[in-house]
Image (cartoon, rainbow, N blue to C red):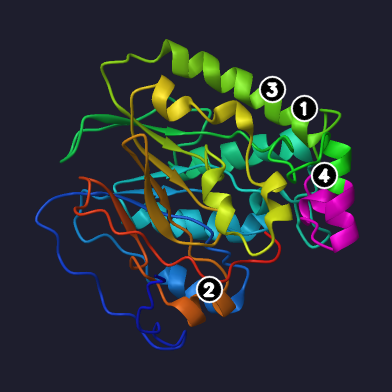
Amino acid sequence: MPHTPPGPAAPDEPLPPPARATGPRLLAVSDLHVGVGDNRPVTEALRPSHEGDWLIVAGDVAELTEDIGWALGLLAERFAKVIWAPGNHDLWTTRDDSVQLRGEERYRHLVELCRGLGVVTPEDPWPVWRGAGGPAAVAPLFLLYDYTWRVPGARTKEESLAQAHEAGVVCTDEFLLHPDPYPSRDAWCRARVAETLRRLEAHDPSVPLVLVNHYPLVRHPTDVLRYPLFAQWCGTELTEDWHRRFPTTAMVYGHLHIPRADLYDGVRFDEVSIGYPREWRQRGHPFGLLRQILPHPEPLVTGWSGPDLTTA
């Protein structure tokens, strides 16, 4: 049964400060989309409840480089540590952006921007959370998607994409997320998966992992999408067993704009997005603005899973 929480405060009303915590927590959020006017006050309201809180930001901060820097800089000033994994919107090259880099060059530019702010990126050593629920290495990943979560019955990427175009359900990535110097987004995805696997295989298995990616590592969360055709822009079958293959204590993702918490093979998966105002005005923020990842909140409560985004 869908969870229907009370509506959120209007965007021009100050949100109440969070209750003080008895100890530091590992928190998470994604899909801030601060370029959408009514989302900026929501981002400004994000504050720690303890001076030792860490914050995971699982992508889609904004489309413009200046907005990404503003949001991550603000959060880095407030939280003891901020960990960022890129979302597809972060990687768009739009005509209004002062930074006109594409593909890998844009990603590397954002990595350096984050490093200048003290924000951890997928290119940095994975920090170890040693608070309650730890120790756990927090691993921000950059994996993209490879169109293997195809429309049922479609035998190839081309068939699946053709059905999406015919139905008018096409991700804006097809126009703004450039894979340069790779020949395609799926080629870039496969390169990122191979590079990430090397790091995961070299990781000390005695230290549990919090895996952070903009996209879910398993396809099942996309089953509730209003438009199932959209799943092909949401992940890759290459990661389906990672939460079992590696010592994973939690998996954090966004992108779907459907806040929820699920268990897969005993591992908690949290979709932590804020989403667009038209979405959060309807459903509220069923888990609050920030999601507690560690220590594990108990009991597990599955979140709202009503109407979702049409394009991510």
Q: Earlier in the sequence, mark 4 or mark 2?
A: 2
Q: Which residue is denoted by mark 1 in the rendering?
A: 187
- The residue lying at 40 percent from left, 25 percent from top is 244
Q: Residue furthest front?
A: 153
Q: CA distance from mark 4 to mark 2?
A: 33 Å
Q: Earlier in the sequence, mark 2 or mark 3?
A: 2
User: Relative to residue 217, is residue 28 depicted above or below?
Assistant: below
Q: Amino acid at mark 4?
A: Ser
User: Observer-nearest residue: 155 or 231?
Assistant: 155
Q: CA distance from mark 1 to mark 2?
A: 33 Å
Contact flag, marks 4 and 3 (Cβ < 8 Å): no
Horizontal side of 303 relative to 90 (left or right) equals: left
Q: Amino acid at mark 1?
A: Ala
Q: Quadrant of residue 251 in the image? A: top left
Contact flag, marks 1 and 3 (Cβ < 8 Å): yes
Q: Nearer the viewer, mark 4 or mark 3?
A: 4
- The residue lying at 58 percent from left, 44 percent from top is 86
| Image coordinates for residue 310, horizontal then vertical, percent | 69, 66
Q: Nearer the viewer, mark 4 or mark 1?
A: 4
Q: Earlier in the sequence, mark 4 or mark 1?
A: 4
Contact flag, marks 2 and 3 (Cβ < 8 Å): no
> Which image quarter is the C terminus in?
bottom right
Q: Which residue is denoted by mark 4 in the rendering?
A: 160
